[in-house]
Amino acid sequence: MSKESKPKPGVDQELIRELAGLLDETGLTEIEIEQAGLKLRVARQAAATSAPAAAPAPAPAAAPAAGAAADRGSDLSNHPGAVKSPMVGTIYLAGEPGAAPFVEIGSQVAQGDTVLIIEAMKTMNHIPAPRAGKVTQILCDNEQPVEFGEPLIIIE
């Protein structure tokens, strides 16, 4: 067996396959994790040349809304009350389908209260309020994929 065909020690190929599958499931282009001192980044390149060919077709009505949400989030990323995503994953605004959301606009939260859940690698991560206050904006939708550092909620 040649050196090139041997897996490197410490590299979990099953984890890489699982992360690649998560990229496909969520439509994300990049995932980065760190476990036990090993930092792993899985990314795919978007086909930039195929996008302009499809661009002349009229955009669906949802596209401007998505762009507006992205702009809204980028404007608020430096807001002192922004709760930012600590990981890449999928947002859940309630504990289970059909349940009431953890918070709504106008809700009062205490520091440590769960404000939403992010599913990452089949693990449900409860995201706590970093401070007490009133929820003034919710910048994400239920079951929406999110990136690391993306603002999700504003607490003032």
Image (spheres, helix red, strand yellow):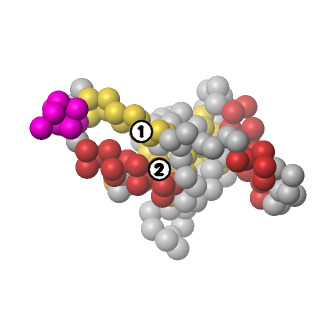
Please state which of residues 89 and 14 is positioned toward the viewer in this rendering.
Answer: 14
Q: Is residue 135 magenta?
A: no
Q: Is residue 45 above or below residue 58?
A: above
Magenta part of the protein: which range? 1-11
Looking at the image, residue 94 sits to the left or right of residue 56; the answer is left
Badge 1 density bin: few <14, some 14–19, many ≥20, Cα 10 Å: some
Q: Which of the labelled discs sits on residue 23, or is there none?
A: 2
Please state which of residues 68 and 117 is positioned toward the viewer in this rendering.
Answer: 68
The residue at 12%/38% (across/down) is: 1
Looking at the image, residue 52 sits to the left or right of residue 43; the answer is right
The residue at 74%/39% (across/down) is: 72
Q: Which of the labelled discs sits on residue 42, or is there none?
A: 1
Quarter of the image with the C terminus in it: top right
Secondary structure under tag 1 reads strand
* Amino acid type of the residue tagged 1 in the rendering: Val
Marks 2 & 1, CB-CB < 8 Å contact: yes
Q: Which of the labelled discs sits on residue 25, or is there none?
A: none
First of labels 2, 1 by sequence position: 2
